[in-house]
Image (cartoon, coloured by chain):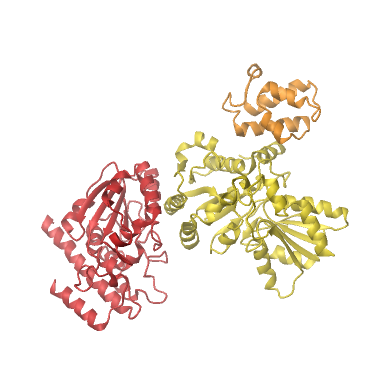
Chain colours: A yellow, B orange, C red
Amino acid sequence: MIEYNKRNIRTWSLLGPSGAHGTAVMELAETNPDVLILTADLCFFSGLERFKTAYPDKLYNVGIAEQNMIGVAAGLAKEGFIPFANTYASFCASRCADQVRVNMAYMGLPIKLIGLTAGYGAGVLGATHVSIEDISLMRALPNITVISPADCTEIIKAILAAAETSDPTYIRLTGPMNMPIVYKEDYNFAIGKAVTIQKGYDVAIIATGSMVAQAQKAAKLLEADGVKCSVINMHTIKPIDSDAILEANENHKLLVTAEEHNVIGGLYGAVAEVLCKEGVHKPVLSIGINDFFAHAGSYSYQLDISELTAESMKKKILSAIN
Amino acid sequence: MTNLEKYNNAFIETFEITEDQLVGLKYQDIEAWDSVGHMGLVAALEDTFDIMMDTDDIIDFSSYEKGKEILSKEDYGVKF
Amino acid sequence: MTEIELITKYEDAAKRIRRHIIDMTYNTGKTGAHLGGSLSIVELLAGLYAGEIRYHADDPNWEGRDRVILSKGHAAMALYPAMVEAGIINEAELSTFKQDGSKLGGHPSLNGLPGIEFASGSLGQGLSLGVGVCLAMKRKGNQDSRAFVFLGDGECDEGSVWEAAASASHYGLSNLVVVVDMNGIQYDGYTTEVMDMAPFEKKWQDFGWNTISIDGHNIEQILEAFSQRGEKPIAILAHTVKGKGVSFMENNWRFHNAALSKEQYEQAVGELEADK
């Protein structure tokens, strides 16, 4: 039984997204006999070291063969198992995209796909291992639930929640080891229901993944400038919580979307789609990666040059509101 | 409880070991002190001493003795 | 049934399947259908569906069934009449082939037709599905069922086929059978000219598979091949003729996907009738 106490929450944040993934699937191994894990030679990288020792018969390593991994997962899913497969987020959406499309989107098989190091998580490895487009690509496929957890605690909750559904699901993991903690204590997580982290009626920052913590920091900086912000954690990009977006539109002067993802087709696109149906809506400022591949570098370097830091957010919001 | 007792307890609780195993214990000496266990230990120590450890210190924390050395630093000011 | 009677039974089934394929194609009018690669696997499917396959027609999800995965999904037109032989679907359904809203699409899909394990059509994916299914069956303690994955020879250009082949051997999938329809022709021409994968049989062996090379139109050899079981996964390399059974279609790449005129239809039917 997972305990959401202070020490555990801190441990998971220290472990980072992969470690949180490892923690969650250990729990599933104990509670859900149909869950099986697949990896494409990323057992250690994806936090499965303990899982491998404890449950070697529930782990399939297909080697560096992502397309085969998804196909094998599909075969297992069709036969009644719940497979969780993982690889770099960039490969989830590109390398094995056809298998994702046919097996998850078209056939609706209950495959749970974990996208490691989404955004700039593997930034030191350069653009081939970075993923700035996965939300956009996954969103455009029917039937796939797309989740982008805000911190390591939420990663665990998202994985556990995904195991309970029969929906094909993609969970993108953003953030570094020692990932900022958004949720200091237990809370209610439900797929498709955005969480309002704080309320303030000038600006609504609708953020996802790693940008939720940045949004919290930015909100604090903005308060010093007399600007009050709501921070809304849109952890589920699809199906998106339209009600939360429309409510934010009602109650604030400016909407902001924030994502460690391309400004094209990700959270911004999803939010804009909801708002445009309304005809009239508040101005929307999009904060994300401006459609370019950054040079390889540390996570913080890449956030910096992509203007995804709290400081940068603050500047942009002040500019937009004035 | 003294700081030393608190420090020892963090190890004992996190790794489910006994006091006599502490001296000379190093990272990866026992199964429990793997990369996951390491973070659990850090979280326990942070909680116990109400501190936040620096990433570099977390990485350098390679043994029971080294840990004491690190926590004694001015940044954390734990007196053993 | 004696062996002769069994072989006759399956050969008769093959004739019926072949005739259905021609009728189904003609019914699509100008749309046309994948004739070549459907006609080449008729005997192979007859051998399975007219009696060899483990299946309960009244319980399509019976755990003890054999799983058939038509990775070369464009040959669905051969699969459907073969399924009629096994009593899985009704003969009447065949007339809906490729009609708007029909359950019998140009490629198999999961839209309500019993007996279809997976939607297919994007080539190179079916063997991975077979690997997953075989792993699952072993997990469930199912020692009897097998998965039969039908691949095209052109399809084996796809790297994903070889990822799956390597893993099948690695996992020791003794319950996995691949049938490669080696009709020697892909969309753009002879496989040897488009992308030569020789030595083909050796590749499967080098990937750890047992191989059985047969005449894909000889029922006796087909049945013999299907009866083989061993420790390793088995690749049945069936040497076939694309468009088999109709003279102007045999080995003719133009009939990979084609419509039939009234004259062509009548000529084809005439040839099949004469062969009865």
Q: Is residue A95 left or right of residue A239?
A: left
Measuring from the top left, give residue C71's x and y in whole percent: 35, 59
**For the N terminus of chain A, which image quadrant?**
top right
Question: For this rendering, which residue is in front, C255 or C228?
Answer: C255
Q: Say whether residue C117 is visible.
A: yes
**With respect to residue C275, does B47 lie above or below?**
above
Q: Nearer the viewer, residue B4 or B71?
A: B71
Q: Residue at x 68, y 67 (%)?
A: A272
Considering depth in this image, is C255 or A220 the residue closer to the camera? C255
Can you tell which quarter of the image residue C43 is in?
bottom left
- Name the residue nearer the viewer: A2 or C98: C98
In terms of image quadrants, where is residue A44? Answer: top right
Question: Does A81 appear above or below A264?
Answer: above
**Residue C63 x %, y %:** 36, 52
| Residue A173 locus on image (x, y percent) | 61, 49
Task: Please state if C172 lies on the left or on the right of B29 as rendered.
Answer: left
Give the answer, above or below, for where A267 lies relative to C133. below
With C227 as the anchor, is C3 left or right in this view? left
Quarter holding the C terminus of chain A? bottom right
Q: Image quarter for residue A170?
A: bottom right
Please tell me how many numbered marks the rendered image carries. Answer: 0
Q: Is residue C247 above or below residue A308?
A: below
Residue C129 visible in image: no
Q: Position of residue A253 (x, y in %)?
A: 81, 66
